Image (cartoon, helix red, strand yellow):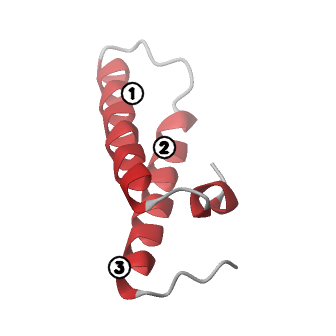
Amino acid sequence: MKMMELHELTQDELQQKLLDLKEELFNLRLQQSMNRLENPMKIGGVKKDIARVKTLLTQMKRGNDDKK
């Protein structure tokens, strides 16, 4: 997920996206624990997406909604 895509979302949509990503991360970790995860690199990608969403939410709270 790109930051440009995230900048187009509202704060409520970002909150929902964060919940969805956390649920996806949980499911991926569950699959990994049962040795059913096909692509372990996906966990890292979801973690980065979570960090991107959290960063954007923090920027919105501070009023620094700079679109870089």
Tag shown at residue 46: 2
Q: CA distance from mark 2 to mark 3?
A: 23 Å
x, y percentage for residue 52?
50, 62
Q: How many marks?
A: 3
Amino acid type at circle 1 is Leu
Q: 10 Å neighbourhood of mark 1: few (<14), some, or many (≥20)?
A: many
Q: 10 Å neighbourhood of mark 2: few (<14), some, or many (≥20)?
A: some
x, y percentage for residue 44?
50, 46
Amino acid type at circle 3 is Lys
Q: Quadrant of the C terminus?
A: bottom right
Q: 10 Å neighbourhood of mark 3: few (<14), some, or many (≥20)?
A: few
x, y percentage for residue 63?
43, 87
**Residue at the location (33% across, 30% down)?**
29
Mark 2, secondary structure of its residue: helix
Q: Would you say the residues marked 2 and 3 are in contact, meaning their CB atoms lie under 8 Å apart? A: no
Q: Which residue bears the numbered disc 1?
A: 28
Q: Establish if 38 lies above or below 48.
A: above
Viewer-nearest of labels 2 and 3? 3
First in sequence: mark 2 vs mark 1 = 1
Mark 3, secondary structure of its residue: helix
Q: CA distance from mark 2 to mark 1?
A: 9 Å
On the rendered structure, is 34 left or right of 48? Answer: left
Of 11 and 43, the residue lying toward us? 11
On the rendered structure, is 33 left or right of 63? Answer: left
Q: Would you say the residues marked 2 and 1 are in contact, meaning their CB atoms lie under 8 Å apart? A: yes
**Residue at the location (48% across, 43% down)?**
46
Q: CA distance from mark 3 to mark 1?
A: 30 Å
**Residue at the location (40% across, 41% down)?**
21
Q: Establish if 55 lies above or below 9.
A: below
Q: Which residue bears the numbered disc 3?
A: 61
Q: Indicate the quadrant where residue 30 lies.
A: top left
